[in-house]
Image (cartoon, helix red, strand yellow):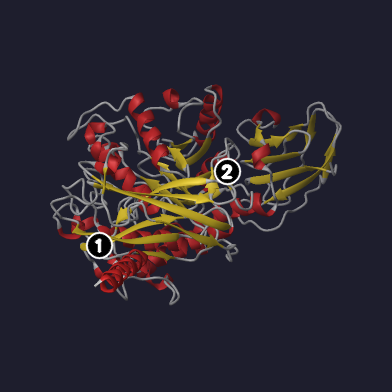
Amino acid sequence: MKKSVNLFVKTCIITLFFTQLNAQKIKGELKKWHKVTLEFKGPETSEKAEDNPFLNYKLDVTFKHNVSGKTYVIPGFYAADGVAANTSAIAGNVWKVHFAPDEEGEWTYNVRFVKGKWAAIRTSNKLKSAGFMDKVNGDFTIAPSDKTGRDMRSKGRLQYVGERYLKFAETGEYFLKCGSDAPENLLSYVDFDGTFKKDGIKDNLVKTWEAHKKDWKPSDPVWKDTKGKSIIGAVNYLASKGMNAFSFITMNIEGDDKNVFPYIDYHTLDRFDVSKLDQWEIVFEHGESLGMFLHFKTLEAENQGLLDNGGVGLYTKLYYRELIARFGHHLALNWNLCEETGDWQNPPRTFPVDVQGRLTLANYVNSIDSYKHHIVIHNGNWFTEIYGKDSKFSGASLQTNREDFGNVHGKVLQVLKEAEAGGKTWAVACDEPGDAQHALVPDADDPEHNNARKNGLWGAMLAGAWGTEWYFGYKHAHSDLTCQDFRSRDLFWNQGKICLDFFNDNKVPVWEMTSRDDLISNKGDYVLAKPGKIYVVFLKNGGTSQLNLENNNTSYKVFWYNPRKGGKLLKGKVTSISGEGPQSLGLPPKDKDKDWVVLIKSMSKS
């Protein structure tokens, strides 16, 4: 009898061991900067279960590097059957955590899985264990990444480092972006799961992205065997044009389009559509592999009071926690907390979004996002009261309002200067240059895009912006809501790449340079300079000009670059300058009345 009891106990112990072992899986490539997913078998539930799995359970995993001691607390999420992108499952017992390790070697993990009323958004240590994987721990070993080229995993996490430019953690490179800010409803796509396609609310704006189906490649991802090809093709197209950023809104209930939201339907704000969010992740992951920066626009003016009347309450916290849990592992992104924040007093909702509300939301997002991604807002009300060293905002997603883009340069300078005076250097991008009606019009309406190029693109970069994204005005075809073909601006994407190529190919150290327009003789032209070392001059209308070298006796080489056609650096009649005070740069090599970039580099090797 005693032997049989002991055998029974041993069998139970062995069964328990293997049950626990099989209850967790580690998926993904165990490599630095790659997505590593811990998958657990938890309680059987569903999106519509009476005991809400999104709100009344909380999964956090603490990852710690065994040598450095570096620690991350990463939120997890309910994943239905674990493969919902392909099955459209709404029920199951799979829970996941995505982690992007930033060091090689051994990492340990410890799981906290608790339950209770509103557990997901509570910080209490008194919440009850939910059993299953709670208190499970383990380890895994991370190898070096094998990625190269544009793939973000070859560069590491893009970080705000207290400077005007974001920096990759692995390579130490600074990042300059150019890409599309439109359409804001990029994710309003027919191949995504969800009720939005036939709920009777702006269904006419749901996209097919059919024009980009030809840009999909057989090696690219899909879901459900054939779905997703056209939106994947759209991302492929932008990358093929040399663009490295695209933006999208993740929730526009009551907004302009009304079809993009992470929830199971338009009216339920505390339950998420698992399969749709898994499908979004396929698009984002593909973009990251192509070197694309992901601009998450999380709210807009019309719905900034939808969740908790503009406060940071249950629905707001749950929304941002789910976004961060599912997508925070991506390496190059920013959280844009709202478009035109604080700038909406029209029906159907009237509410004040006060300064403290903006700061409180930034604090909350920063507390959940263990990776500390760049946090920005679109200007509605101006940024004045959210500057400061204690603010969790680290930059601006700047919007302007002139058809000719004529105030882009000055507005970038204004924000940089004001933020600095407030005690913190901001990284500023101009993400909606131009006005709402026109902005970046289709090639068919303006094939040369002279104002966009001169005042918007180069105006932003030579003010010290770390990049631009481009809005499509509503008075034109392929607008911010109706665009389904990025080729509508094909000629301008060429000009964007030409701009990026200039800075990257010539290794211009923009992070060491500041705007010095006062040094050029022609009013309205731009100068970015590290005096005594290097100057970049943008001459809007070519012609002759003088650069003030001030009080230094350094000798410089003078090169010309065509911002319309790109190519190699050229030489004009004046190939070098030296001496104190104003010095003539001579005339451009050709097209003397058109815009040119002049690169002036010190001959000194120091």
The structure residue drawn at horizontal position 32% and vertical position 66%, both measured from the top left corner, is: 13
The numbered disc on residue 458 is: 2
What is the tally of numbered marks visible in this picture?
A: 2
Quarter in which the C terminus is drawn: top right
Where is residue 458 drawn, in percent x and y? 57, 43
Pointer 1: what residue? 93
Q: Is residue 257 left or right of residue 548?
A: left
Vertical placement of residue 279 versus 398, above or below: below
Front residue (pair 286, 1): 1
Which quadrant of the structure image shows residue 4?
bottom left
Which quadrant of the structure image shows residue 375?
top left
**Amino acid type at image mark 1:** Asn
Vertical placement of residue 551 versus 542, above or below: above
Front residue (pair 294, 96): 96
Front residue (pair 579, 302): 302
- Residue 170 visible to the viewer: yes
Q: Nearer the viewer, mark 1 or mark 2?
A: 1
**Which SS class for mark 2?**
helix
Where is residue 149 drawn, in percent x and y? 60, 63
In space, the residues marked 1 and 2 are separated at their CA atoms by: 52 Å
The structure residue drawn at horizontal position 37% and vertical position 39%, both measured from the top left corner, is: 337
Vertical placement of residue 246 versus 392, above or below: below
- Residue 593 visible to the viewer: no
The numbered disc on residue 331 is: none
The structure residue drawn at horizontal position 39% and vertical position 34%, both measured from the top left corner, is: 362
Q: Are marks 1 and 2 in contact (CB under 8 Å)?
A: no
**Which SS class for mark 1?**
strand
Where is residue 393 drawn, in percent x and y? 45, 33
Which quadrant of the structure image shows residue 214?
bottom left
Vertical placement of residue 301 versus 570, above or below: above
**Amino acid type at image mark 2:** Trp
